[in-house]
Image (spheres, helix red, strand yellow):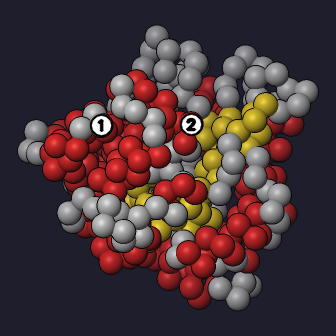
Amino acid sequence: MSAYTQELRSTVRAMMADGKGILAMDESKGTCDRRFEKLGIPTTEERRRTYRELIITTPQLADFVSGAILFDETIRQSTREGIPFVKVMQTAGMIPGIKLDLGAKDLAGSPGEKVTEGLDGLRDRIAEYYQMGARFAKWRAVITIDTDLPTQAGLVANAHALARYAALCQEGGLVPIVEPEVLIDGAHSIERCYEVTERTLQVTFEQLRLQRVALDTMILKPSMVISGASCSEQASIERVAELTVGCLRNNVPVSVPGIAFLSGGQSNERATAHLNLINAQFAAQCPWVVTFSYARAIQQPALDCWHGDDANIPTAQQLLYHRAKLNGAARKGKYTPEMEQAV
Ligand code: 13P
C-alpha cells in the first residue's frame, strides 16, 4: 500500500464524479504548434498560454470536467493577471493532472513501432508536480496496427513502461491514467482492432500486476474498438459500442474503478455518440465508471473559433462548454443528436 492510498482513492472518486469526465489539454509543445500552424496561429509560448487560459477559465466548465491534464509548460503558466493555472483550476473545482511521458520514439529493431520514453528521473518529476498541485497523471503508449504489427516485443515494451510509470505515480501520490492507445490509422477492420486491443489490454494488465500496481487506484484510458480510419466499411455506432464493451469486459479487471476513453481522431459527434451508447445500453455490463478523457473531440470547435484572435474568446468558451456538456450527458447515457444544435 502506498502512503497515499486514501488520498489516491478520494482523487479517483473526484475524477470519476457523476456526469463528469476528464479534459485532455496536455498536447506537447510540438503537437500544439502543429495544430496552431494548421490555422495560421503564431506558435509562440504566449499564444499557447492564452489558448490554455481560454480553456481553464471557461465559465462552469467544472460542471462536466472533473480534472484536466496539463503539459509541463502549461502547469507552470499563469493567467494574464498572474494567477497560476493550478490555482485557477483548484478554485473552479477541477483537479490538475500532468502528462508525464516524454513522447513515443522509434522502437529499436522493430520498424514501424514506437515505445514511449520518460522513466529516467520520473520519481523526482512526480515529487515536483505533486508539490505544484497535480493529483493525477497520464502516460500514453501508442500501438500501431499493420499486417505484422504490433509485435509482442512492441506490446511488452510499452506495457512495461506503463506499469513502471503507474507504480511510481502511486508511490508519489498521483493517480495514474494508463493510456494504451491503439491507433485509428489504417485500413483494418473493426474485428482486427478488437483483436489488437485485446492483446494490448492483456499484456498491459500482466505488466501492471507484475509491477504491483494497485488496480483500484488507477484509471484506464483506452481507445474504442473501431474500424480503421481508411477502412472502406465503417462499423455502426451500435457495433462500436458492443465490441468495445465486449473487449473491455473480457480484459479489464473489475477492481479498476474507471475507464476514460480517448477520442483518437473520431469526429466530435461520433466520440460523443459512442460514449453515450455504451452508457445508455451497456451500463449493466460495465462494473467500472465509463467516461471521457477527450482532447480533440472537446477542444476542436473552440480552437477553430478562437483562431488566435482574442476577440473570439467568449464564443470559443461557449463552444468548449457545449462539447463538455454533451459529453457529460453521454457519460450518463442521456445525449441525443438534437442536443448538438442548442449551443
Ligand atoms: P484525443 O482525445 O485527441 O485522442 O486525445 C486524448 C489524449 O490524451 C491523447 O493522448
Task: Report which residue position mark 2 lands on.
Answer: 30
Q: Give the alpha-carbon distance from disc 1 to disc 2, as whole Å.
A: 17 Å
Q: Is residue 92 visible?
A: yes
Residue 343 is left or right of residue 12, and the answer is left
**Quadrant location, the N terminus:** bottom right
First in sequence: mark 1 or mark 2? 2
Q: Is residue 263 visible?
A: no
Residue drawn at point x = 72 percent, y = 84 percent: 2
Residue 98 is left or right of residue 336, and the answer is right
Can you give x and y, in whole percent of width and height, for residue 161 in the image? 78, 52
Which amino acid does the dot numbered 1 rest on? Gly
> Residue 308: which numbered mark, if any?
1
Can you give x and y, in whole percent of width and height, for residue 292 in the image? 41, 53
Is label 2's Cβ within 8 Å of ligand 1? no
Which amino acid does the dot numbered 2 rest on? Gly
Residue 340: name its quadrant.
top left
Reply above or below: 230 against 280.
above
What element does badge 2 sit on?
A: helix
Can you give x and y, in whole percent of width and height, for residue 33 in the image? 48, 35
Residue drawn at point x = 46 percent, y = 11 percent: 232
Residue 121: name its quadrant.
bottom right
Reply above or below: 49 against 149.
below
Residue drawn at point x = 55 percent, y = 81 percent: 9
Q: Nearer the viewer, residue 42 or 62?
A: 42
**Quadrant location, the C terminus:** top left
Residue lying at the far top in this picture: please name it. Answer: 232
Q: Nearer the viewer, residue 105 or 142?
A: 105
